[in-house]
Amino acid sequence: MIETSPLTVLETLVHETCKPETEVLTMAFRAGLRQLWREHSLGRYLRGEIDREKAIEVVGIDWVEMAEKQHEAMLGDLAWALAE
């Protein structure tokens, strides 16, 4: 995988979207906060700290269903590894 520096990504986005750097940075900050909140909320759901309905309200059903599938797959992999 080719790693691109954050500065290169920023410069590319500014150039290709024709948006000011401050606007691109604001968008990136908001997107990052949304992602962190989603991960935090899904973690709380999977740990049983909030119920499914609350998780769906916070992040949406698609994200909850994907987290459930990933969690089930991880538990299956763990069970398989421990059985070896």
Image (tube, grey):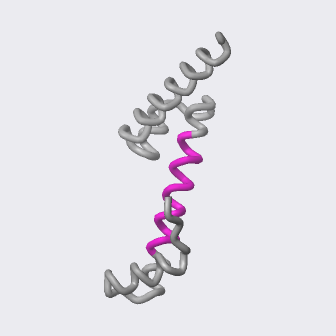
Question: In what quadrant of the picture does the C terminus appear?
Answer: top right
- Location of residue 14 by image quarter: bottom left
Q: How many marks?
A: 0
Q: Nearer the viewer, residue 42 or 49?
A: 42
| Closer-to-camera residue (16/40) | 16
Describe residue 18's horizontal placement relative to residue 56 as left or right: left
Residue 62 x, y percent position in the rendering = 36, 39
**Rendered residue at 47%/29% (across/down):** 68
Residues rendered magenta in the picture: 27-42
Q: Is residue 5 magenta?
A: no
Q: State the residue at coordinates (63%, 31%).
A: 47
The rendered magenta stretch, by its main secondary structure, is classed as helix
- The residue positioned farthest toward the front in the image shown: 1
Asked if 11 appears above or below 84 in the picture, the reply is below
- Residue at (44% x, 33% y) in the render: 53
Q: Examine the structure image and report whether residue 34 is included in the region drawn in magenta.
A: yes
Does residue 33 appear to the left or right of 18 in the view shown?
right
Please tell me whether residue 1 is drawn above or below residue 20 in the rendered image.
Answer: above
Where residue 13 sits in the image (x, y, percent)?
A: 39, 79
Residue drawn at the location 40% of the way across and 33% of the way down? 65
Picture coordinates of residue 11, whole percent (x, y): 45, 84
Counting from the top left corner in percent of width and height, residue 69 is at 44, 29
| Vertical placement of residue 2 versus 22, above or below | above
- The answer to whether residue 43 is left or right of residue 62 is right
| Outermost residue toward the left in this view | 17
